């Protein structure tokens, strides 16, 4: 294997990765960006360069604006390695990845991790049935293949993405059978103190108001403050059930799109043994970094949603900030020039972060949809371990997620705990009556993607 | 349990996008499907009613794509004889041969000619 040395290797070609690459090139660094997809843009701007006019009108102006980032990146002179699955990032600044079934390695002088976010697991009865997907997954289907639900659809959960998808569907002429959301009075009260700060980011707030108006205009049946979600069906989704104002509802549907926010994709930073702490506001693990996003003094930085959920625009600014950090570490750029640029980037970043505390408080996913009370709910989808089993493990002395592996292979399937880790941590914390911080998380080891021996040898 | 048939159900998703050409031909469980170029295998199969994509190793429960971005591994299928491929990360290609992945997959040894390995 031939090791190329790059000043900077970036993992992820979403807003954080693209902005970081473009910024680092402007400071004269050699840059390679690795990403699993064939084209740049990450999930949020997925397929934006190849998108049709119709797709752009359905997905909206925020999506179309992503083309500015992808274009600037394409002209930056950074190397884009598409279709690359990173399976190991080392503290020796080596990055191992698979490309077309063969193993490759890049030697870097610094690394920026920009692996983005994933939808928070939504462990409710029936969530493993075919016909149940994430709202984000459904949005990816629009971006990748112009695919829209064939029949009227049910959207359920909470968070901005749920409303955004609803509006995009309406724009595309898709009928919504119902939008069932969990946001209630208590959530508004919790969010109130953060409203003044959010108002200073009023453009974002206005966008949100417009989305809600559109839903009303289309007379979408909206059930607010609903709870006790479940999906019924034998071998596929047949109905969506919930409780609204104390009454049980059942809506027949073959497609249920769930969403209760996004969480950082921390698989790489965890595998690096970087310190992570539990966030009580974001309800997930956040890597500990310095001001620029650097893990300890490793030369490895984190930017964007994989450092903590901040949204696309703030992610891009964090990418730029990390690139400035890398540049000053590697090559002592002109100090005044760097300071001026850094001040500008930090000001933009602050602007985009203003609305976050408000959103986090308002769209906090409800406890019963994170820690299912029903013992029969599947928590680990790969190895089919239920909430009841995990509570049993705790009864007989299981202290944390790593031990659940020994008890019942929980978290040991191909997804390597990505879809059950947060649930398992919170379930154990709840059963032990301690904080998630005490319970901890799975020990994540490379390879962080399934790799065959043949591919390694390749 | 289902998935003993090779049949396609009525698709959960459809695309009437005239700007997209269905120019790629592939085989799914012995049937010929024409699908949009540039689509992932997962998107293409969903558009043609191929769910479920796999059954689980533990209880043979039927599964279909959940995340569409490489995280959940629910879309694992066999592509050109290689088991355990993430359909949502694989772009469709002319002549691709795709099969459902039933039960335990051999994540090991994706050598040539192991198409009938079950």
Image (spheres, helix red, strand yellow):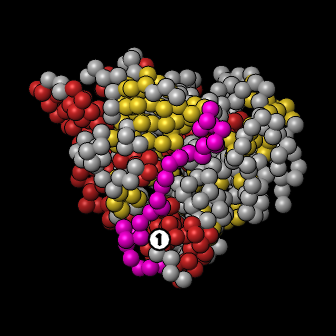
Q: The residue marked by circle 1 belongs to what chain? A: A
Position in image of residue B56 (x %, y %): 73, 57
Per the rendered image, the range of residues in magenta is: A431-458
Q: Quadrant of residue A382?
A: bottom right
From the viewer's perspective, is residue A105 above or below residue A228?
A: above
Position in image of residue A156 (x %, y %): 56, 57
Q: The C terminus of chain A appears in which quarter of the rendering?
A: top right
| Residue at (50, 66) in percent of width and height | A402
Q: Quadrant of residue A433?
A: bottom left
| Residue at (36, 47) in percent of width and height | A307
**Main SS, magenta residues:** loop
Q: Quadrant of residue B25?
A: top right
State the residue position of label 1: A400
> Is residue A452 highlighted in magenta?
yes
| Residue at (29, 36) in percent of width and height | A322
Q: Is residue B84 left or right of residue A441?
A: right
Position in image of residue A17 (x %, y %): 39, 33
| Residue at (24, 47) in percent of width and height | A290
Position in image of residue A175 (x %, y %): 64, 45
From the viewer's perspective, is residue A84 above or below residue A229?
A: above
């Amino acid at each position: 294997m031939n090791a190329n040395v790059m000043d900077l290797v970036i993992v992820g070609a979403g807003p954080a990765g693209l902005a970081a690459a473009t910024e680092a090139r402007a400071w004269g660094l050699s840059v390679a960006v690795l990403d699993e997809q064939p084209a740049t843009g990450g999930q949020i701007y997925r397929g934006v360069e190849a998108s049709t006019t119709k797709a752009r009108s359905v997905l909206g102006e925020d999506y179309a604006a992503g083309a500015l980032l992808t274009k600037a990146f394409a002209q930056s002179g950074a190397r884009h390695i598409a279709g690359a699955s990173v399976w190991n990032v080392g503290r020796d600044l080596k990055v191992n990845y698979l490309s077309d079934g063969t193993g490759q390695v890049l030697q870097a002088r610094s690394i920026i991790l920009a692996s983005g976010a994933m939808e928070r697991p939504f462990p409710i009865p029936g969530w493993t049935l075919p016909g149940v997907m994430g709202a984000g997954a459904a949005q990816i289907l629009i971006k990748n293949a112009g695919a829209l639900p064939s029949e009227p659809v049910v959207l359920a959960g909470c968070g901005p993405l749920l409303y955004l998808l609803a509006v995009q569907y309406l724009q595309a002429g898709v009928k919504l059978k119902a939008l069932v959301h969990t946001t209630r009075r208590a959530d508004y009260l919790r969010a109130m103190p953060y409203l003044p700060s959010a108002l200073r980011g009023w453009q974002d707030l206005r966008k949100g108001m417009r989305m809600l108006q559109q839903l009303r205009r289309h007379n979408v049946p909206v059930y607010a403050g609903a709870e006790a979600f479940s999906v019924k069906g034998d071998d596929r989704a047949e109905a969506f059930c919930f409780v609204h104002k104390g009454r049980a509802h059942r809506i027949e549907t073959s497609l249920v799109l769930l969403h209760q926010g996004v969480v950082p994709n921390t698989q790489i930073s965890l595998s690096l043994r970087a310190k992570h702490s539990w966030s009580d506001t974001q309800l997930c693990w956040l890597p500990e970094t310095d001001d620029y996003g650097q893990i300890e003094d490793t030369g490895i930085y984190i930017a964007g949603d994989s450092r903590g959920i901040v949204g696309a625009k703030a992610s891009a600014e964090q990418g730029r900030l990390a690139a400035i950090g890398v540049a000053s570490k590697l090559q002592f750029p002109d100090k005044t020039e760097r300071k001026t640029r850094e001040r500008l980037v930090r000001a933009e970043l602050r602007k985009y972060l203003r609305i976050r505390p408000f959103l986090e408080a308002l769209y906090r996913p409800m406890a019963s949809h994170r820690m299912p009370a029903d013992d029969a709910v599947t928590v680990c989808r790969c190895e089919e371990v239920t909430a009841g089993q995990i509570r049993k493990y705790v009864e007989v002395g299981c202290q944390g997620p790593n031990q659940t592996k020994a008890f019942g292979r929980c978290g040991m399937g191909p997804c390597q705990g990505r879809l059950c880790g947060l649930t398992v941590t919170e379930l154990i914390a709840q059963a032990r009556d301690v904080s998630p911080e005490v319970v901890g998380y799975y020990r994540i080891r490379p390879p962080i993607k399934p790799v065959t021996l043949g591919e390694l040898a390749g | 349990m289902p998935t003993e048939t090779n049949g396609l159900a009525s698709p959960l998703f459809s695309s009437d996008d005239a700007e997209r050409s269905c120019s790629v031909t592939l085989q799914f469980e012995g049937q010929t499907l024409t699908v949009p170029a540039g689509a992932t295998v997962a998107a293409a199969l969903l558009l043609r009613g191929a769910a479920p994509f796999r059954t689980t190793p533990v209880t043979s429960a039927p599964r279909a794509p959940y995340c569409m971005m490489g995280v959940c591994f629910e879309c694992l299928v066999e592509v050109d004889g290689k088991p355990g491929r993430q359909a949502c990360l694989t772009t469709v290609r002319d002549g691709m041969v795709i099969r459902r992945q039933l039960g335990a997959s051999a994540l090991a040894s994706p050598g040539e000619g192991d198409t009938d390995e079950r």
